Image (cartoon, rainbow, N blue to C red):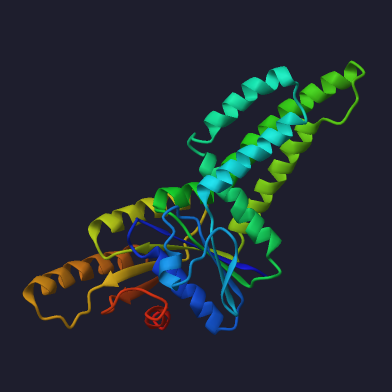
Amino acid sequence: MLKVEFYGGKGGVGKTTLSSARAYYYTKLGKKTLLVSTDPAHSISDVLGVQVGSKIKSITPLLDAIEIDPEEEANLYIDQIRRDMNAILSPVVLEDVNKQLRAAKVMPGTHEASLFDKMIELMDRYKDVYEVMIFDTAPTGHTLRLLTLPELLIEWFAGLIKKREKIVKLKAMLGLKEEDPILTRLKMRHAIFLKAKDIIQSENTSIHLVMNPEKMPLEETKKAMRFLSEAHQPVTEIIINKILPPNIVDPFFKNRIEKEQEVISEVKAIYKDLKITEIYMIDQDMDADSLIKIIDLL
């Protein structure tokens, strides 16, 4: 069965490096893996040393990668809605609808909804192709919205379906017994989000929060943990990245090391039931070769 992992955390903490390293780790175990970037900044091309793009690209015999373009997916998402509306509404109404759809492209939530559709499409279409799918997400807020979107939209679509069913019944009472394309579309969307909820809350799906050993990333991690707990989305692992090596003797760095260890101790005390992974800094920039050093620490 497909194993799905989401990597989230504050911007700049190293999500891309660690999700890429984890992807390589699974290939070392002989598992066919897809690495997916949902971050508009897209850095997996830089880390892997290969230009990836919005189509699935083979990196090694067991590793493929794709960078989802939020702008492109939002356009496709709105275009699909427009096609659905063209088949249902009159030309007079369509002019107003098209104005609304043009505005919707830049409205909050459109990118998340379109990204989520693409993620579910990948998980559903390729569930028999890959053994592992790893999602390198944008900074924390974006990740939290993506992971909790199904719960919100399931209820919303259920409400819309009930209202539409009342309209269909009224039409039937007037002798207008015909298939309702709007109701059909609403039920299809509802089914998609039910499937998404099942995938995300499956025991084969895990959430991994990445942080640096500093106060601000720790506070953001605490907020994310609370939010996900309230949304019934348990976190599997906290990865503390970019830890200074303990053998540095310079007074400046020695003080930094002590502060970092205080943060690490706090994480371990608060989240003692979670897997806590510590990743120490290495003496080179991140690229495909240096990922090998990280893999051994995971």
Percent of width and height locating residue 33: 58, 73
**Vertical comparison of 206 with 292: above or below:** above
> Horizontal placement of 216 versus 296: left or right?
left
Percent of width and height locating residue 223: 36, 50
> Horizontal placement of 67 versus 295: left or right?
right
Image quadrant for the C terminus?
bottom left
Foreground residue among 115 and 209: 115
Instruction: State the residue at coordinates (73%, 30%).
Output: 86
Foreground residue among 230 and 58: 58
> Horizontal placement of 284 versus 138: left or right?
left
As drawn, the residue found furthest toward the left would be: 251
As drawn, the residue found furthest toward the front would be: 51
Q: Is residue 273 visible?
A: no
**Vertical comparison of 251 with 228: above or below:** below
**Vertical comparison of 226 with 127: above or below:** above
Percent of width and height locating residue 23: 51, 73
Instruction: State the residue at coordinates (68%, 30%).
Output: 160
Instruction: State the residue at coordinates (56%, 49%).
Output: 115
Image quadrant for the N terminus?
bottom right
Residue 269 occupies which quadrant of the picture? bottom left
Q: Is residue 169 visible?
A: yes
Percent of width and height locating residue 229: 46, 52
> Horizontal placement of 89 versus 255: left or right?
right
